[in-house]
Amino acid sequence: MATQSTTIQLTLLSAEGLHVRGKPANTNVFAVVRADSIASHTTATATESNGSLSWEETFSLKVGPYARCLTIEVKCRTGAGERDVGVARIALSDFLGRSVPGNRLQLCYRLRDWDGRENGTVNFSVRVVAPPQPHAAADQNGCESSLGGVVTGIPVWLEESETSNRSNI
């Protein structure tokens, strides 16, 4: 895994086949997305569209260097409160470190309820945001360094006999 944080852009596209207690869940449905940490999460609210749920919500998540998975929880607000619909846990290795045409990968994962039964699918796309590249900085002598710090050099003095021998070669 990487030694620094990675930023990913995730777009929740839609959800299909969701049920709560045997009844279709088409309204008051929302999703919570987490990247292995309770501190790094965001929420998107769904809207109903022709029998399937369509979010079209894009957001960024910072993924820590030791994160292993991304979790998408789909929930529903009912008269009795919030109900869990299903959860999908996606291994970050499914899309980190892959070269993808257009830098965007579209995925579909099956949701499972807390008893492990299948309960619909969630469709999303993901894009890994490239970290900013350090740009070269010129010092007062016009020399460029991509490190942006101080460079120490040790001068090497050649004796005259060595330099004259080299010029004759």
Image (cartoon, helix red, strand yellow):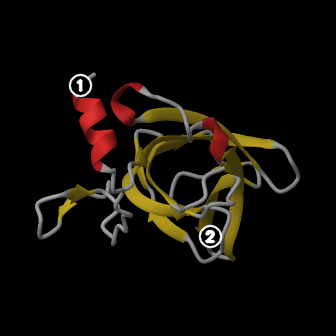
Q: Nearer the viewer, residue 44 or 143?
A: 143
Q: Nearer the viewer, residue 29 or 91?
A: 91
Is 108 situated left or right of 162 in this image? Answer: right
| Residue found at x 36% / y 56% | 156
Is 121 situated left or right of 58 in this image? Answer: right
Circle 1 crowding by C-alpha within 10 Å: few under 14, some 14–19, many from 20: few
Question: Where residue 115 sits: x, y (%)?
Answer: 88, 53
Res 29 seen here: no
Indicate the secondary structure of the residue bearing disc 2.
strand
Tell which residue pokes out farthest to the top in this image.
169
Q: Earlier in the sequence, mark 1 or mark 2?
A: 2
Q: Nearer the viewer, residue 53 or 44?
A: 44
Residue 122 numbered tag: none
The kind of residue tagged 2 is: Thr
Residues under numbered marks 1 and 2 in contact, where contact means CB atoms less than 8 Å apart: no
Q: Nearer the viewer, residue 128 or 71?
A: 128
Q: Quadrant of the C terminus?
A: top left
How many numbered marks, from 0 up? Answer: 2
Q: Which residue is under mark 2?
A: 78
Question: Where residue 39 sits: x, y (%)?
Answer: 60, 77
Indicate the secondary structure of the residue bearing disc 1.
loop
Q: Which residue is under mark 1?
A: 168
Disc 1 versus disc 2: nearer the observer: 1
